[in-house]
Image (tube, grey):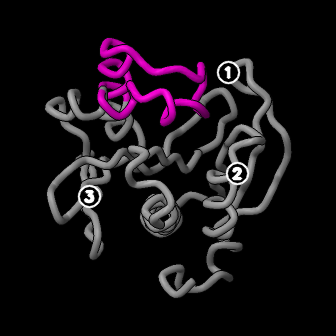
């Protein structure tokens, strides 16, 4: 499936393409960006290439995936946001990762809200989770701003992570997310 293109006033969500490798390697090569990712260290170009291939292939297997988040002002890729199936948990996760120059500006929250709406309204999901290191206060804040609630501690990838959740019914009760 070709990922749909979604535009907001500030950014465009579009499918990743192989030509995104250099910019994505720059973002994932930043130790601060990768601090709360599994492994907690910058990724090599080879690791980024495998991840990029996986992101692109995910859309062929599932009716959702991760998008490249691209600034509308200068066409700079800011990072990713979207939905990823986690076979280890048999769950779908909302995932967001941005270049640190775009932190604390609401981009992750806005893109994650769009991802939830897409997951429930377009992909027909009943539940979406999010995972974070317990000490990653910024990520947990995003989860809470988009209406997710704490579910439990979970163990995945040899890590103990907090797991938040939102169901289709919870999402529906929130009303239009753009007004929050």
Spatial distance from mark 3 to mark 2, Cα to Cα?
Answer: 31 Å
Q: Are marks 2 and 1 in contact (CB under 8 Å)?
A: no
View extreme (right): residue: 152
Considering only vertical position in the picture, is 84 above or below 28?
Answer: below
- Could you tell me residue 129's position as x and y percent? 66, 50
Quadrant of res 114: bottom left
Q: Which residues are magenta?
A: 26-54
Between tags 3 and 2, which lies in front?
Answer: 2
Secondary structure of residue under mark 2:
helix
Q: Is residue 102 visible?
A: yes
Considering only vertical position in the picture, is 42 above or below 17?
Answer: above
Q: Is residue 65 visible?
A: no
Between tags 3 and 1, which lies in front?
Answer: 1
20 displayed left or right of 139: left
Between tags 2 and 1, which lies in front?
Answer: 2
Which quadrant is the N terminus positioned in?
Answer: top left
- Please tell me how crowded label 1 is: few (under 14), some (14-19), or many (20+) other residues with Cα within 10 Å: few
Quadrant of res 48: top left
Secondary structure of residue under mark 3:
loop
Is 146 inside the magenta-drawn segment? no
Indicate which disc, 2 or 1, sits on the residue closer to the N terminus: 2
Secondary structure of residue under mark 1:
loop
According to the picture, the residue beneath numbered tag 1 turns out to be 157
According to the picture, the residue beneath numbered tag 3 turns out to be 4
According to the picture, the residue beneath numbered tag 2 turns out to be 137
Indicate which disc, 3 or 1, sits on the residue closer to the N terminus: 3
């Amino acid at each position: 499936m070709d990922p749909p293109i979604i535009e907001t006033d500030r950014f465009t969500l579009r499918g990743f393409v192989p030509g995104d490798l250099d910019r994505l390697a720059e973002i994932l090569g930043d130790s601060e960006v990768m601090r709360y990712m599994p492994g907690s260290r910058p990724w090599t170009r080879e690791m980024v290439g495998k991840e990029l291939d996986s992101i692109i292939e995910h859309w062929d297997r599932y009716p959702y995936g991760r998008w490249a988040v691209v600034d509308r002002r200068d066409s700079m890729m800011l990072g990713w946001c979207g939905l990823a199936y986690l076979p280890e948990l048999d769950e779908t996760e909302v995932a967001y990762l941005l270049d640190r120059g775009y932190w604390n500006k609401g981009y992750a929250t806005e893109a994650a809200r769009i991802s939830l709406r897409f997951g429930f309204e377009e992909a027909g999901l009943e539940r979406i989770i999010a995972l974070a290191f317990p000490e990653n206060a910024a990520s947990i804040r995003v989860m809470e701003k988009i209406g997710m609630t704490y579910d439990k501690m979970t163990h995945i990838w040899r890590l103990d992570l907090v797991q938040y959740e939102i169901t289709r019914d919870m999402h529906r009760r929130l009303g239009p997310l753009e007004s929050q």
